[in-house]
Structures are given as C-alpha cells and as structure tokens.
C-alpha cells in the first residue's frame, strides 16, 4: 500500500486575539498527536495565516479549523 502524499495547505483565518489563534492551535495539535494526518503546522495571529503540512485531505483540515468557530476567509493547496 502506497503512503499518502504529503501536502501543504495555507488558510486565511479570521483571528482577532490569542484566544482565537489558541483555539486553532489546539485543534491542529490534537490532529497531530492523534495521527490524523497533520505532520506540522504554524498559526500566525499577526498575518492571520495558518499553514498545515501533512497527509490529511484539504477538506478534513478545513473542517477542523471551522469547528473552532473561526471564519476561514480562504484556503489553498500550496504543495
């Protein structure tokens, strides 16, 4: 069985405070530690940018971020 390809996704997420970025960080950390296809991520409150690298499908990552209640203004696959 082939190993799923790793992708890099970039999201523009409306985060207005450290609580907002913390919520996104928590959900991505949970996905990373549970083996849900997230290898690494970065959450930048200043640029309101979230970068996620891993094998999880784009839609799965998008749903995880949306479940925090934060508005995802845009998202794209970088690699």
Image (cartoon, helix red, strand yellow):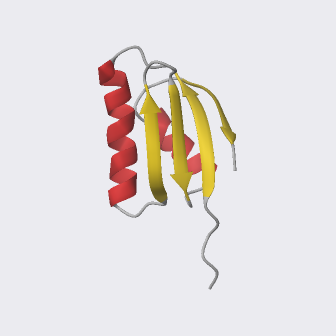
Residue 33 position, x and y percent, is 33, 58
Q: What is the total number of numbered labels drawn onto the structure image?
A: 0
Quadrant of res 68: top left
Q: In percent of the image, x 49 and y 34: which residue is there?
A: 66
Would you say 14 lies left or right of 10 here?
Answer: left
Q: Residue furthest top?
A: 16
Residue 27 position, x and y percent, is 36, 43
User: Compared to 53, does 72 lie above or below?
Assistant: above
The quarter in which the N terminus is drawn is: bottom right
Q: In percent of the image, x 53 and y 28: which residue is there?
A: 49
Q: In percent of the image, x 42 and y 27: which residue is there?
A: 69
Q: Residue furthest bottom?
A: 1
User: Compared to 15, does 8 lie above or below?
Assistant: below
Would you say 2 lies left or right of 13 here?
Answer: right
User: Compared to 53, does 20 lie above or below?
Assistant: above
Residue 73 position, x and y percent, is 61, 23
Residue 78 position, x and y percent, is 69, 44
Depth check: 20 or 68 in front?
20
Q: In percent of the image, x 58 and y 33: which residue is there?
A: 11
Depth check: 29 or 62 in front?
29
């Amino acid at each position: 069985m082939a190993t799923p390809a790793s992708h890099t996704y970039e999201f523009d997420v409306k985060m207005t405070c450290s609580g907002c970025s913390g919520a996104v960080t928590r959900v991505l950390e949970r996905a990373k530690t549970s083996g849900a296809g997230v290898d690494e991520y970065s959450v930048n409150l200043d640029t309101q940018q979230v970068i996620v690298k891993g094998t999880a499908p784009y839609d799965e990552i998008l749903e995880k971020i949306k479940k925090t209640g934060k508005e995802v203004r845009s998202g794209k696959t970088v690699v």
